[in-house]
Image (cartoon, helix red, strand yellow):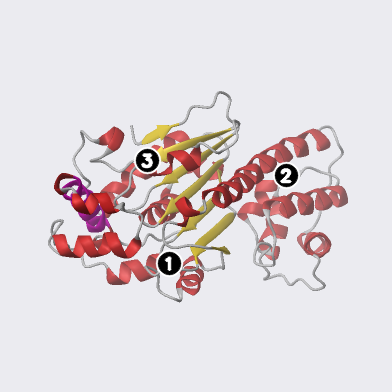
Amino acid sequence: MEFRVLRRDDAQVRLLMFHHAGGSSASYYRLASQMPLWCEPCLFELPGRGIRSGESYAPDYMTAAGSAVAAVASMADRPTVLFGHSLGALLAHTVARDVPGPARKMIRSVVFSACPSPGWVAGRARHPSGPFLLWPAEALDAELRRRGGCPEEVFEHADLLRYAHTVLGQDMHLVDTYRAPSGGLAGSDHRLWLARDDLSLPPDTPQGWTGDLGFAPVTRWFEGGHFYLDTHRSEVAAALVDIVEQARNVQRADHQERANVLGAGSSTVAEPEMLAIAAEAWRAVLGVTDVSAADDFFALGGTSILATKAVVLVQRRVSRRIRLRTLLEHPRLADFAAAVAQEHP
C-alpha cells in the first residue's frame, strides 16, 4: 500500500501528500489531521520505511514515480488535490504530468512546495549506477544540517544516525536519477509555496518553475526555512484547507450547472460570436478592460471559483449547458470559444 489513508467516511475531496527526502508519511500526519472531515488525506510513502518498511528501496526515480502514478490512478476517483514538499514536489509534478484517463480529470489543484524547478533538478542530476556513490556519510550529515528539521539527538545516537543516512541517501539517489517529465499538466490550479529563509533553493526558483510549466504558478511565500510546514503549521493548514475547499466548491458548482440548465432550451452559436461572448464574460469576472484571443484565463488572475462565474455568464447568453471543465481544460480564450462552439447543444 503506497498511501497511509486517514479514513473519512463519504469524503468529498482527497488530499494526496508526498513527503520530502529522508521523510515518511508520518512526517505529514499532524498537518493532515487538521483537514476538515469531508477531506480525506492520503499520505504517500516511498518504499523502505513506515508502512512500506518491508519493501526494497526504489532503484531510481522513475521506478518510485511510476509507483506513485499507479497509486494515484487508482485513488483519484473524486476531486483530488496533490501536495508535494521538496522531493515530494517532484513526485507531485510527475504524477500531474503522467496520471492517465479518469483520474487525471479528477485532479483540481497541485501544490509544489520548497523545491527547485524540475529543469533545474534534472540539469544537475548525475545518474550514478547506485546509491551512496555520491553521498558519503559526511555529505549526508551536511545535508541534514543544511536543511534543518532533523533533531540534534539523531546526530548523537549512532543507530538513529545510521538509519537517517540510509533513508536520506536512498532518497538523494532518486534526486540524482531524476529526469523531468514532458506533456501537459493535470489540474487547473497550480501553486508554488516557498519559504523566505529556505537556503536550499536557488534564488530564481519562481522563474524556473514558470519556465518549466509554461505559465506562472500562483506563488505564496511563508516565513521560515525549508521545513516551514512544521514551524508554521497552523498557517500552512489554513492555506491547504482553502485549496481543498475550492476543489469541493468546483465540484458542487459543476453539479449546480447541470441542475440549472436541465430542460432549458439550447442554441448553436458560431465561433466568432462565442469568442465575443466569452471575452465579455472574462472581462466581467476578472475585472480587466481588455482580453485578447490568446489570453489565458488563469494567467489573467482567474481561479476555479471565477471560472465557475464566467461559465455561468456564458451559459446565460447561449441558453445551454457548458461544462466548467471546458474552461479548465481550455483556458486560452480562443481555445475555449472554439471548444464551446463545437460542443453539441
How far across and how far down the image is residue 112, in percent? 48, 57
Quadrant location of the N terminus in the rendered image: top left
Residue 344: mark in rendering: 2
Secondary structure type for disc 1 = loop
Counting residues from the start of the chain, the first of labels 1 and 3 encountered is: 3
Asked if residue 289 lies left or right of residue 218, the reply is right
Q: Position of residue 245 (x, y in %)?
A: 65, 42
- Relative side of 161 to 66, left or right: left
At mark 3, the secondary structure is helix
- Crowd around label 2: few <14 · some 14–19 · many ≥20 (10 Å): few
**N-terminal of the two: label 1 or label 2?**
1
Task: Look at label 2 and name its amino acid.
Answer: His
Residues in magenta? 160-174
Disc 2 on helix, strand or loop?
loop
Q: Badge 1 is on which residue?
A: 198
- Is 52 situated above or below 332? above
